[in-house]
Image (spheres, rainbow, N blue to C red):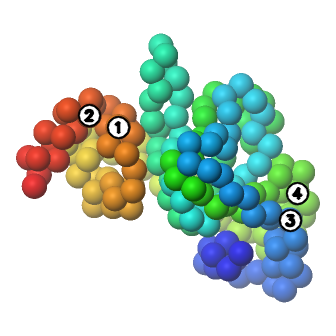
């Protein structure tokens, strides 16, 4: 729980009462390698903070699974539109290795949002991540495959170090063979 509290306090310092409620409402869960955390077509009822592990977000297109992002330690994950709007998810989240998370149910999120300091944290965190996401999509769309790989290598080396090559290839939109050629040309 210390990782979660440190992350939250890095955005907004919590008081003891709010920290106590966070500790009470977030629950530790363990997902086995390849286990689905969030399933397509179901309403996502939880928000997760990754204590340790690796999770990929993907969707199916014409029977092929396409990786949208790969998450590692100390990141929040959820199917945003599904969780926030309580509607079926169009994407899936899968543990790529044994993954330990702290989960918060939608109902308990509503309770925590009544705590002003947690609400301030939440607003700050969402603003930060929405800004970074907007910036990322702007940059990423204009990059070719090699630039995308180099960007991941510089900005997210933990993804390159831990994720399967097929998931990295899917993330940057190339075949595994093309990714191998890109990696060989860089080395």
Q: Give the mark, 3 or 2, whose residue is nearer the N terminus.
A: 3
- Identify the image quadrant of the N terminus: bottom right
Residue at the image point whose x is 47% and y is 27% from the top: 65
Reading the image, the residue beneath label 4 is 108
Disc 2 vs disc 1: Cβ atoms closer than 8 Å? yes
Q: CA distance from mark 4 to mark 3?
A: 6 Å
- Which residue is painted at 28% across and 57% down in the image? 153
Crowding at dot 1, Cα within 10 Å, few <14 / some 14-19 / many 20+, comes out as: some
Q: According to the image, label 2 marks what residue?
A: 176
Q: Secondary structure at mark 2?
A: helix
Residue 30 in the image: above or below residue 140: below
**Where is mark 1, residue-wise?**
166
> Which quarter of the figure has residue 90?
top right
Residue 72 falls left or right of residue 16: left
| In the image, farthest residue toward the top | 62
| First reached walking from the N terminus: tag 4 or tag 2 | 4
Mark pair 4, 1: CA separation: 36 Å
Q: Which of labels 4 and 2 is toward the front?
A: 2
Please name the residue that numbered disc 3 is placed on: 25
Q: Residue at x 68, y 57 (%)?
A: 30
SS at mark 4? helix
Dot 3 alpha-carbon crowd within 10 angstroms: few under 14, some 14 to 19, many 20 or more: some
- Marked residue nearer the N-terminal end (2 or 1): 1
Q: Position of residue 127 (x, y in %)?
A: 61, 57
């Amino acid at each position: 729980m210390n990782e979660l509290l440190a992350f939250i306090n890095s955005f907004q310092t919590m008081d003891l009462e709010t920290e106590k409620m966070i500790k009470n409402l977030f629950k530790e869960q363990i997902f086995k390698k390849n286990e689905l955390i969030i399933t397509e077509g179901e309403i996502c009822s939880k928000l997760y903070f990754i204590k340790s592990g690796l999770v990929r977000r993907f969707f199916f297109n014409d029977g092929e699974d396409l990786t949208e992002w790969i998450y590692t330690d100390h990141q929040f994950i959820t199917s945003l539109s599904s969780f926030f709007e309580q509607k079926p998810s169009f994407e899936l989240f899968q543990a790529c290795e044994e993954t330990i998370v702290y989960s918060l149910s939608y109902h308990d999120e509503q309770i925590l949002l009544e705590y002003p300091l947690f609400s301030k944290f939440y607003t700050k965190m969402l603003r930060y991540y929405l800004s970074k996401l907007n910036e990322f999509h702007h940059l990423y769309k204009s990059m070719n495959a090699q630039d995308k790989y180099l960007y991941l290598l510089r900005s997210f080396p933990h993804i390159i170090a831990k994720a399967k090559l097929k998931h990295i290839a899917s993330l940057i939109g190339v075949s595994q063979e093309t990714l191998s050629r890109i990696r060989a040309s860089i080395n």
